[in-house]
Amino acid sequence: MSNDNAALSRSIIGNLAELREGEVALPRFLFKHADGLYVDPAKLDDLEALQAAVDRIFSAGACFQGLDYAAFTHLLYDLDLLKTHSQGGETTKPRRLARDIVAFRASRRTLYKAVKMGDGKVEYYFEPVFEEDDGGNTDPDGKPALTRATLDFDEFVADMWLKGIRFGINEPTVREFIATGTTGRFVIARRRDAILGKAADIQELAEEIHRDDAPKELPNGRLDLRQFKNRFPQINKGVHLLKKIPLVLGTPGREISGHLIEPPIPKDFDLGTLAGPGTTVVRDANGEFIVSQNDGFLNLDTQTNQISITEKIVNRDGVSVRTTGDLLLTGDEYEEYGEVQEKRTIEGNSIMIHADVFGIVSSRGGTIDLKRNLVGGMALNQKGDIVIEGVASGATLHTRSGVIRVKRAESCVIIGTKVVIENASNCDILAEEVEIGLAEGCALAAKVIRIERAVPRKQSEMLGFVMIPDQGEFKRKINALSDKLEDLKAVLGKMIAESEKLKANPDFRKYVTIAGKVRKGEITLTPEQQTNLQKMAAALSPHLKLLAKLGENTKAKMAEQSALENQLAELKEIKRVAEAGISCNVAAVGDEIHIRTLPLKPDTPSLFDTPPKELKVKLRGTNSVGEMLFAGSSGTFQWQYSSPQDANA
């Protein structure tokens, strides 16, 4: 309770044998000790008994003094209390609940207003409250004088209890609003919703767990005749196939009224009903598993949901409509000895194929290694290298992050981080770095170009584009940011100067000095001096407000300055990285070739995002873009990019 109320309050705990009016008797599980009021869980028959005792105390016009609200809600609603009581343990020890029980005077009860309840929360309107003066003073009309009163958290809990709010009060918030005299409607209590549990589930541990040669069903319900559901789920002995994820019970919640909110019990199942021939159920410290008992291929019975391991099988028949359909693999590595038919797709990770490929090979990572030829198909790798040890003809090779190595490439579209080709003819190539032994009639763009011999081929020009950063765009952006930064610094300087001028005001400096000493306790003011200080503060109020506003604006401008400086530094770093290492070297020019720069603007769609089908148009349609570096039919060409001096860089 507040200091004034605490000083006037006295304990109303009485003896049952000599109980006087206004006193309350304690049940056997509540007892008074020198340092406070305690609850003895060992003597508590059930939780309802404590709740009933609290209700009687509050209904009798009393409240707890110095209430430990956390202990209060724990003792009232902890579902584990009775269990730990029966087993013994720390929770059977007496728990301090409050300092005492005191009267909650009727004149004080009127200070606490009605609440607004709904949607699992309670709102209370905090406002100034007044009570009649205890000294008998009256106002000019002869009525009892009113004095400013302060709410009390202990009384607040008692009043809320009688209003049906018996759980979920936000103690720190309420105490803060009472202490600061905050005015307004605020949420002071919330329901604690139950947390749903999780039903028992199955976790698939094997990389491929469903073997099914039926056509794959698409999300729209149609069947894809090009794909089987799963063709090659090969399993070794001792592999953990499935793991049972045990059910997780939910966590009960509480209504504001204190009533329990029970979550539903999650569903469960017996893992043994899923273990078929060739598998067994293993239970150990890590959980409950279905484990393969022998090598073989996995089979799932859709009728019984049983999983079984059958005889071993090896596929060397290639990828076609007849043998496998399109393959969507989840393993870490795939090796194929047969031919990949035209329009057939293999999608997996680290793919090696020993025969010719006429279809599409797509990898999520690792290396695509084609031992023979890629004809009219595609090799796509999201993150990793592509190696063609034979010939790539009329094909598309694309990796988002990796090296493409080809022995011979003819009429191909090739996009990669780095491209290395022994012999390239009539190809369109885009990379950060390109190395070619013999380039015939190709159009290529890269930051680093190295060609041993370059010649045109029939009607195909030999074009090279060295990708460089667009200096004009960089300069424009850097200058714009620099100018904006300088303007901002000028504004900041004026604001700081104005603030210093205000601080130099003699009256302001005098007020700050006195107020600081009072705050630190260095001096004590007489009532008259205190009044004078308040008058001084009132007189300086516009001055103080202006200074505070200037401080806020200065802080905002400084944050803006920091953000601009970071943007400028980032842009300069992007420029530096974009300029690093750019070069072009052609050891031998056999016939007419053209080499130009290809300026790239920052913050524009990357050239590497160009769809492969559009790359040819992009490269061969930019013959007038950039600066001509070389146009000739013989000799050699060596060029190293040098960044122009930028006054703002």
Image (cartoon, rainbow, N blue to C red):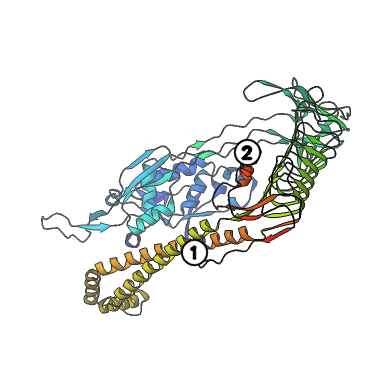
Q: Are marks 2 and 1 in contact (CB under 8 Å)?
A: no
Please indicate, yes or no, whether residue 260 appears anywhere in the rendered image. yes
Assess disc 1: are there few (<14), some (14-19) or many (≥20) residues with their C-alpha within 10 Å of its C-alpha.
Answer: some
33 relative position to 227: left or right: left
**Residue 255, position in %: x, y?**
46, 38
Q: Quadrant of the N terminus?
A: bottom left
Q: Quadrant of residue 342?
A: top right
Amino acid type assigned to the residue bearing label 1 in the image? Glu
Residue at image coords 69%, 36%? 246
Please indicate, yes or no, whether residue 12 appears anywhere in the rendered image. no
**Residue 628, disc:** none
**Residue 133, position in %: x, y?**
21, 58
- Tell which circle, 2 or 1, labels the residue nearer the N-terminal end: 1
Name the foreground residue: 616 vs 341. Answer: 616
**Residue 411, position in %: x, y?**
74, 38
Name the foreground residue: 641 vs 595. Answer: 595
Q: Quadrant of residue 151?
A: bottom left
Q: Nearer the viewer, mark 2 or mark 1?
A: 2
245 relative position to 476: left or right: right
**Residue 163, position in %: x, y?**
36, 41
- Check disc 2 and report the residue beneath it: 614
Q: Is residue 496 above or below residue 439?
A: below
Q: Rounded to the nearest whole Å, what is the CA distance between mark 2 and mark 1?
A: 39 Å
194 relative position to 347: left or right: left
Q: Quadrant of residue 53?
A: top left
Amino acid type assigned to the residue bearing label 2 in the image? Glu
Q: Is residue 173 above or below residue 282?
A: below
**Residue 565, disc:** 1
Residue at image coords 53%, 54%? 95
Name the foreground residue: 496 vs 412. Answer: 412
Name the foreground residue: 646 vs 104. Answer: 646
Disc 2 on helix, strand or loop? helix
